[in-house]
Image (cartoon, helix red, strand yellow):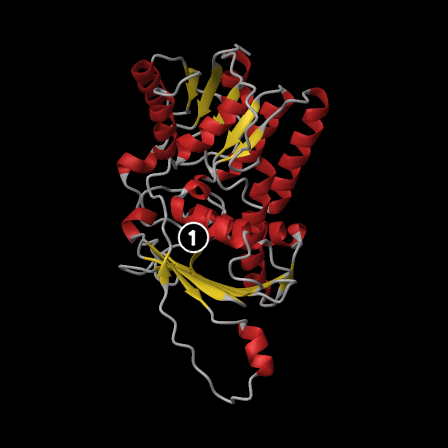
Amino acid sequence: MNARNVKIGLVGIGGIGQHHVNYLSGMDNVELVGVCDTDREKADRTARKHGTTAYYDAADLLDRSGLDLIIIAVPHYDHPTIAMEAFKRGVHVLCEKPIAVHVNAANAMIRAYEDAKRTHPGLQFAIMFQERTLPFYAKLKELLAAGTLGKLTRATWIHTKWFRSQAYYDSGGWRATWAGEGGGILTNQCPHTLDMYQWLFGLPEAITGHAHIGKYHDIEVEDEVTAYFEHANGMIGHLVVTTAELPGTNRLEIVGDTGKLLLENGKLLHYRYPQSMLAFSRETEQRFAEWTIEPEEVAVDESAPNGHHVVTRRLVDRLLGKDVELIAEGPEGLGSLTLANGIMLSAFRKRTEPVPIDGDAFQAELEERIRTSSYVKKAVRAQDAAEDMSTSFGKTN
């Protein structure tokens, strides 16, 4: 690898792929050596604009461009396949979320990475969880790591700012189908939310999920979900998400023994308890009690660098030999996927599911829904039809 530049290839030039190309063009120590898409016109146009080479097959990009690092921005089902081909060649990987559609595929991807490192010890694998860089979430992580709230007892996240219209779902033949996307709101809109939950609180030991299929839209996947998480330390968690609400809510409440944090509407509030809540409950002689607490607004540096380019910059710096931590190591993508698959498996089987979840059972449920699907898209906008997914190596979008 050139001591001054990391040679990067991008596979998948949809909306997020275009975003990657745009910031890469202005990034130091980076050379964009190829862009790849099955839409040849799109690949050619993007290559011309950014002074690079167009490829139409991911294998060609891997074999002919001379890249050091591939950024994978294709549909979800193709993430593991392309990543594993890259690992075999000793090519570093930065994968868009989610890591895969189901945990079995993610585990195969992680095993391939670990195997490849025996031959290529410096091989790097990162996943694009850029929301970890968002200032409010980074501050929450800092406060919780410092034990600000003491023993955590509850986390409740109502995140319904995911409105999607029927026109959105009609905009691609693959969209919101089991075969094309592998799920609905949990697979498409919420991987960052699920990653943030497990990043802040860890994985639960049991998941109970309620998922409503096409409740508000003409789709065959989930558009409203409520989940209940039970953690080994006694903490419980709640997650409420939907693509049907306007204007929607994004409210995260974290309760601990010594305080509460509330994040909503661009403000982070800290309620400091006068003493241990749990000790007070055990020791007080009062049968009823109330605490009147004026919350303090926590100062957050909203100007701190954040976003996709920060994740990529960190990986590039590591490849250049700098001693830096990645925003998210690739195998960490298994956490959010465990939550997503666990919620759906619980909903499918109408029972609480232990963690780690039964990956074979979820994969079987998913494959059965694909096999028996009779869902037919009623409308696909012509200008978006070209954005249909394919699920074979070498065909990307």
Q: Residue visible at 35% across and 44% down?
A: 301
User: Looking at the rendering, which quadrant does residue 276 occupy?
Assistant: bottom right
**Disc 1 secondary structure class:** helix
Answer yes or no: is residue 166 visible. Answer: yes
Answer yes or no: is residue 395 visible. Answer: no
Q: Residue visible at 32% across and 50% down?
A: 378
Viewport quadrant of the C terminus: top left
Camera-nearest residue between 394 and 28: 28
Q: Where does residue 258 sit, x and y in percent of width and height? A: 52, 66
For label 1, the residue is: 185
Viewport quadrant of the N terminus: top right
Camera-nearest residue between 232 and 285: 285
Residue 337 to residue 255: above or below = above
The residue carrying pointer 1 sits among few (fewer than 14), some (14 to 19) or many (20 or more) residues within 10 Å by Cα, namely many
Camera-nearest residue between 186 and 376: 186
**Residue 345 relative to residue 13: left or right:** right
Q: Where does residue 117 sit, x and y in percent of width and height? A: 68, 25
Q: Residue visible at 35% across and 53% down?
A: 162
Residue 151 to residue 317: above or below = below
Q: Residue visible at 39% across and 30% down?
A: 17
Q: Where does residue 184 sit, x and y in percent of width and height? A: 44, 52
Query: Which three-letter amino acid code belongs to the residue tagged 1?
Result: Ile
**Residue 239 relative to residue 358: left or right:** left
Camera-nearest residue between 126 and 13: 126
Q: Where does residue 388 sit, x and y in percent of width and height? A: 39, 36
